[in-house]
Amino acid sequence: MVVKGPALASDTGAKPASAAPVAPPTPPSPPFVMNWTGFYVGAQIGYGYGDNDGSITYATPGGLAGRSNLNGDAIGVIGGAHLGYSWQFDKWVLGLEGSVDPTLMSRRPVISVPNVAADPTGALGIGVSATGAIWSTIQGSVRARAGYAFDRMLFYGTGGVAVGEFGSNFQLYGVDLNQAAIPPVGPPFYAADQRFAVRAGWTLGGGVEYAINSHWAVRGEYRYTDFGHMGDFPAATSTGVVYAADRHLDQNQVQVGVSYKFSEDAPVTAKY
């Protein structure tokens, strides 16, 4: 009698199941470095101050005369749009940018200069009072840019030509002296002027820009701009006083902005 035991795998011709294939690990993505070359357009908004640094000089027939400083910066929102093109050479970035900024910058100074000799208490009103305003409606600039890129971060300086439209008015009034009268109160005087002017100047500043991806970037920027001087002189209807006011139109602006780059160039891969 033949006794048969349990069949072995080798006896049936069955083969062991093979192990499932293991996928190789995905290599890490190379660091992203922005390619800054290309056209871009964007918008900016911020805060501006300045444009009211100067003085007023005056004289009346009765002998009132003097010089007073104009103080108090024109302040307000300044913001608009920009357009530019950049070229990247290794880490260096050069470019040209134009911007247009409507503004709400304004100031209304008030000056009061009593005559302390003839009217020590100010009760007679002998002296000079003045009110006025300075404002800017729109500004623009064309500037060169030069910077150095650290991966997504671009540090840059900028400078070029700036143009701005400004308005100014002034009213100077008071009571004149009369040396023969007691108290020495003379006739009233009044003078006024209003002017609008476009001034060209220069602008210089710098900032930092950060690339969110290959198209979008955000920035922060500071610029100083000098538009030269603007003067006020009394109109022909003024009576009994002459004056000349001079304002130095120099201003500061701090802005943040966002830009969109149109170029379809692929991002640069960092090399190590």
Image (cartoon, rainbow, N blue to C red):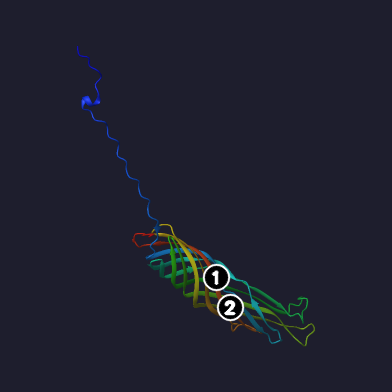
Foreground of the two, 264 or 7? 7
Q: Quadrant of residue 132?
A: bottom right
Give percent across and percent down for residue 198.
50, 77
Q: Could you say whether the residue bearing mark 2 is in a helix, strand or loop?
A: strand
Give percent across and percent down for residue 82.
43, 67
The nearer-to-camera label among 2 and 1 is 1
At x 65%, y 78%, the residue is 69
Q: Quadrant of residue 186?
A: bottom right
At x 60%, y 71%, the residue is 73
Give percent across and percent down for residue 103.
52, 68
Q: Which mark is residue 252?
A: 1
Q: Residues within 10 Å of mark 1 (few under 14, many from 20)?
A: some
Q: Marks 2 and 1, how far apart in space? A: 15 Å
* Position of residue 207 in the picture relative to residue 171 (left or right): left
Identify the residue under disc 2. Answer: 247
Q: Quadrant of the C terminus?
A: bottom left
From this viewpoint, which residue is outermost toward the left?
1
Foreground of the two, 193 or 205? 205
* Position of residue 13 in the picture relative to residue 29 (left or right): left
- Looking at the image, residue 217 lies above or below residue 136: above
At x 24%, y 26%, the residue is 9
Q: Quadrant of the N terminus?
A: top left
Q: Amino acid at mark 1?
A: Asn
Q: Amino acid at mark 2?
A: Arg
